[in-house]
Image (tube, rainbow, N blue to C red):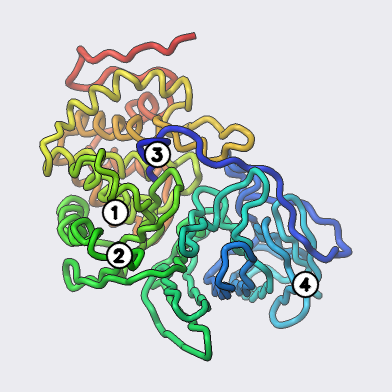
Amino acid sequence: MLLNPRTRFTSALLASAVSVCLVAASAPAAPLGVGDRLFPYLGNPGYDVASYDLAFSYPGTNAKPLSAVTTIDAWTTTELEQINLDFAHGTVGSVEVDGEPASFTSAGEDLVVTPREPLPAGSWMRITVRHTSDPVSAAGRDGGWVRTKDGLAMANQADVAHLVFPCNDHPSDKAMFTIRVTAPNGYTAVANGLPTGVDRVGGATTWTYRTQNPMATELAQVSIGRSTVVHRTGPHGLPLRDVVPTKDRALLEPWLKKTPAQIEWMESKVGRYPFETYGLLVAEASTGFELETQTLSLFERDLFTEPAYPEWYVDSIMVHELAHQWFGDSVSPRTWSDLWLNEGHATWYEALYAEEEAGRKLVDRMKAAYGASDRWRAAGGPPAAPKPPKPGQKIGIFRPNVYDGSALALYALRQEIGRPAFERVEEAWVGLHKDGVAGTADFERLASDIAGRDLSAFFQAWLYAEKTPPMPGHPDWKSVAPTA
């Protein structure tokens, strides 16, 4: 995610309790979580999701809920008498477990399902939930569906995929996705991955897409609109597709055609692009951010049409979201405290691209970041131990400390171990953990191994200390102390 110039370092989403209209089950239910420090009730223990099959039916208006069916295939990791799913903004009509009706109720933001018989550990289960998916936000709660001028898109980061569909809503549990969208003729639907079919029946069309790599729920994307899909070819024959408002096809082409060269640039830094396709989804909506949804990054139209933004700046923002396909998407954070690995790396390559392609000196940006770093740490916490979001401001974890503050830590690492070793760390990181999850401790071990020495003291200071440590190679750099 990258907050736009108007709101880049401010909170954009408010959260409040929302309820699910459910039938009561007889057994007591309680919300669970996987113990994430920042989002304690996000995700659920006891099972590992293998795949999601999402089917949405769009009624042709953003004012009414979509009808939906979510099918989850998963392995149990312990015996389960109840199955907790994250789901908090829709009406559930029925739930089946392995084809048999199951009772269900709500607990906090969980949908708690009770199968007829307990499920033993190590068993395969299929959960089918028939529900609605409401694009109209609950009072004080944004996120999930984004209502655009001509349809819908998704923005599920960090913790709101479960406002759209029942799921295990934590990036540590990645899964394959099949997404089916039915909409009235005249609309175009696009989702993550590659298309596998288009079926037209009467006045409606159904599009089906399937990922070829596992994906975190926060990265799911569905676009429904009066859109044109623009196709071109990237490096190694990579199929690229951009989704743009039809009326803006020619206007946006000067930006869209930049993607192949940007992918080539990223591949020169960290290796081959990790997915089956890529492209930009340009939406007529005011989100306050751009978002790295897997294989189809979400951008506000205004980023490309606002004349005040210089070309080099827009280019670097495009590279920021592209870099996330490696850092955050292919290699997902083990916990949300590991967010710095996503945003720090995306900001790093954003800044490096601006230096190499537009002459915007990286050292100048890093020196400015160093000057502000102590203030950022005081306000948001150190990069790898961000302060929890304030109530009602869950997107508040996206603060300067995890953007330029974390890129600053990467710059310090390059200064500490040298450019050749640093570049080996970067390429090895995305290679070792492709399609997986990894955390700060994993990065520290890898960097120490490649550097040939223990870097634990370095990382402790740069990622966890209250004050910014001295910058290797720049003893004259000073950080301005925060005001009381």
| 94 and 477: which is toward the camera | 94
| 323 and 11: which is toward the camera | 11
Element type at marker 1? helix
Q: Say which of marks 4 and 2 sits in front.
A: 2
**Residue under the point 46% across and 33% down:** 10
Which residue occupies the extreme bottom position in the image? 202
Element type at marker 2? loop
Q: Residue 351's x, y, as percent?
A: 22, 38
The first of marks 2 and 1 along the sequence is: 2
The first of marks 4 and 2 along the sequence is: 4
Q: Residue 272's x, y, as percent?
A: 22, 61
Q: Say which of marks 1 and 4 sits in front.
A: 1
Q: Say which of marks 3 and 2 sits in front.
A: 2
The first of marks 1 and 4 along the sequence is: 4
User: CA gap, disc 3 to disc 2?
Assistant: 23 Å
Q: What's the residue type where badge 2 is placed? A: Tyr
Query: Residue tagged by mark 3?
Result: 340
The first of marks 3 and 4 along the sequence is: 4
Displayed quadrant of residue 472: top left
